[in-house]
Image (spheres, rainbow, N blue to C red):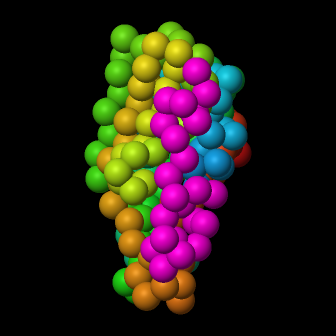
Amino acid sequence: MSSETRYPEELLGEDSDDGTMPENVATLREAVVGHRIVKAEAGVETTDRWGRRTTAPLVITLDNGKRVELRNTDDCCAYTELESFLLHPEKVDHIITGVGTTDGYDTWHIYADMGDVLELSVGWSCGNPFWYGYGFDISVKELDDETR
């Protein structure tokens, strides 16, 4: 089942989003489709370049040995943050076929043919459109990147 039929692409008003949220979903889709989730967990809290503590990213470990990290962002009044996530362990043996959203990009669905494998509850705002940055900072890393 394609993402168009399971979760139709959401359209936001031009004052609500400048394309950041659909781009975030596309980036996540590119990283996870065709793989299985081995685990999903909160990562390690770090400090940014100014010495401020950052929240721990969501780390999705895939069957190909890669880790997909979704890190919250905030810039003045604009932000994107993961509020919660729910992994459906009975479905992790299925290959991910898509990523879609509902509720105005507040609920993200990573799904397989049997249904949602992982659901994300996301809070976000573009702030004062579009002066500030928002959207997850998404990175894909090899498992041994941390030991280098």
Instruction: Decide whether residue 15 is among the magenta residues.
Output: yes
Q: Quadrant of residue 126?
A: bottom left
Looking at the rendered image, the quarter that the N terminus falls into is top right
Residue 36 drawn at (x, y percent)? 57, 20
Q: Is residue 138 magenta?
A: no
Residue at 62% x, 40% y is 29
Q: What secondary structure prevails in the magenta region?
A: loop
Q: Residue at x 33, y 60 (%)?
A: 123
Residue 132 seen: no
Tell me if residue 50 comes above or below residue 45 in the rendering.
below
With respect to residue 143, does 148 lie above or below?
Answer: below
**Residue in the picture at 40% in, 46% down:** 102
Tell me where residue 113 appears, x and y as whole percent: 53, 15
Q: Nearer the viewer, residue 119 or 10?
A: 10
Query: Vertically, is 128 above or below 138?
Result: below
Q: Is residue 49 above or below residue 114?
A: below
Q: How many marks?
A: 0
Q: Over which residues does the magenta segment extend? A: 1-23
Is the C terminus in the top left, top right, bottom left or bottom right quadrant?
A: top right
Task: Give the residue displayed 52% in from the left and 20% down from the top.
Answer: 112
Q: From the viewer's side, name the closer residue of 44 and 80.
A: 80
Locate residue 64: give its quadrant.
Answer: top right
Residue 137 occupies quadrant: bottom right
Residue 130 versus residue 80: which sits nearer the camera?
Answer: 130
Can residue 10 be seen here? The reply is: yes
Question: How far across and how far down the image is residue 23, in percent?
Answer: 63, 57
